[in-house]
Amino acid sequence: MKINTLFLIICLLAGTTIFSQEEQAPQISELPAGWWQIPKTPVIFTFGGYVKTDLIHDFDAIDSPDFFDVSKIPTDGSKGESTHFNVKETRLKLDVKYPERGLRAYIEGDFYGSGSSLRIRHAYVEYKGLLAGQTWSNFMDENIIPATLDFEKPAAYAFARQGMLRYKHAISDDMYFGVALEESKATGQAPVQAGKFENPLPDLTGRFRVTKNWGHIQISGFLASIRYRYDAGNKDDITLYGGNLSGQFNFLKKDKIIYQVVYGPGIGRYRGGQSVALDQNGNLEPLTDLGLTFGIEHFWTDKLSSLLVYNYGKVENTAGQPTSALESTDYFAANLIYYVMNGTFIGVEYLRGNREDYNGADGTANRLQLSVRYSFNM
């Protein structure tokens, strides 16, 4: 996305909530730090982001230089070593609010677009409990995303941003549920007969969360479908579903433990994987996946922290899949981060991943990453 296109979107987002000049809005006397009021309106806004530089050294071959994607580890015995710089995680954001009406418009981008161009990560409008736009899936737990220096995060981990219509309702001060219709992106192994995959319906997702001083626990699920339409005229419809149990446990002053268990037929679509494959007769059936994640973050001092995170993924392969199909993954990350100030840090991280295929072939990759980030959040 071009910079001038982003500027146009920002102007439109701000403009949708601004009163006409004939309406004289009172001046808001006490604004949160870093927020400004648009003159003659009750609308406030803030902008920010950060610049992040990663120095990445791979000790082994991996077809994913900018982030550590374990599924891209070769299993044919390939060797390779490389070092390069990456600045694509650098981000820009704009947040616009009309507090009296409960309105909010938010947009955020990074540079992981084609050719390092600016791309949209989040872009949505929110009115009280209703949200329309693109943001984190209602199925995942965005509050436990591991604080790795690596951009990719664990492999077998529910991690997706999607277009959606979402409703959240607070049951009490520490409890809520949310339901959403989300863009469906399921795909899979195509049958021998010519045709194409379709996603005729949006995914239905739901979550329930309880938050206490000790942390939170969340249960979520999804229901989806995928269709294969044969050129001959007939079609196959496959139902997909899955569950997610996740949460965070706080201890000491700033330390925390995070965990996530995801399981279900077709759940790989929440990590860019396939949702269906062929059985021994060449018919489509869902791929059932299991993902386990455990992490612990410890602050040695107010400015020095470490994270350890482990992730394991397992696919129940079908008889009709190629022998080179992914069967299991292991992911491990450990880092040490020094915070110069809030959001600004220098850190080093070690990553290790393993991929095993259906035929038993496997491959391992090791990476060392040095990251420097300067935040200019207002």
Image (cartoon, helix red, strand yellow):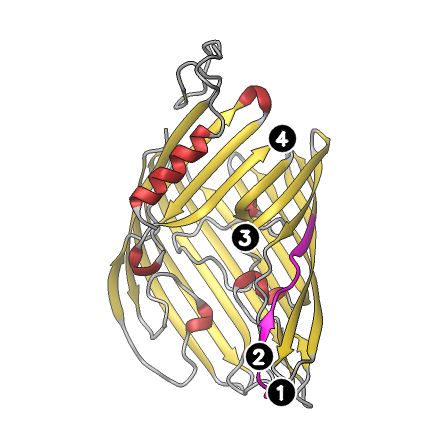
N-term mark: 2 or 4: 4
Q: Read off the residue under disc 3.
A: 162
Q: Is residue 318 above or below residue 8?
A: below
Residue 201 point in image, percent of width and height = 66, 60
**Residue in the picture at 36% in, 34% down:** 48
**Residue in the picture at 54% in, 22% down:** 99
N-term mark: 3 or 4: 4
> Magenta region: which residues?
192-206
Q: Secondary structure at mark 1?
A: loop
Q: Read off the residue under disc 4.
A: 128
Under mark 3, the amino acid is Gln
Q: Secondary structure at mark 4?
A: loop
Residue 12 point in image, percent of width and height = 42, 34
Badge 3 density bin: few <14, some 14–19, many ≥20, Cα 10 Å: some
- Place residue 126 in its image quadrant: top right
Marks 3 and 4, how far apart at CA: 20 Å
**Residue in the picture at 52% in, 23% down:** 98
N-term mark: 2 or 1: 2
Badge 4 density bin: few <14, some 14–19, many ≥20, Cα 10 Å: some
Q: Read off the residue under disc 1.
A: 320
Under mark 2, the amino acid is Gln
Foreground disc of the pair 1, 3: 3
Marks 1 and 3, how far apart at CA: 30 Å
Q: Do residues under tags 2 and 1 come within 8 Å of each other at their CB atoms?
A: yes
Q: Read off the residue under disc 2.
A: 189
205 vs 7, left or right, is right
Q: Nearer the viewer, residue 1 or 138?
A: 1
Marks 3 and 2, how far apart at CA: 22 Å
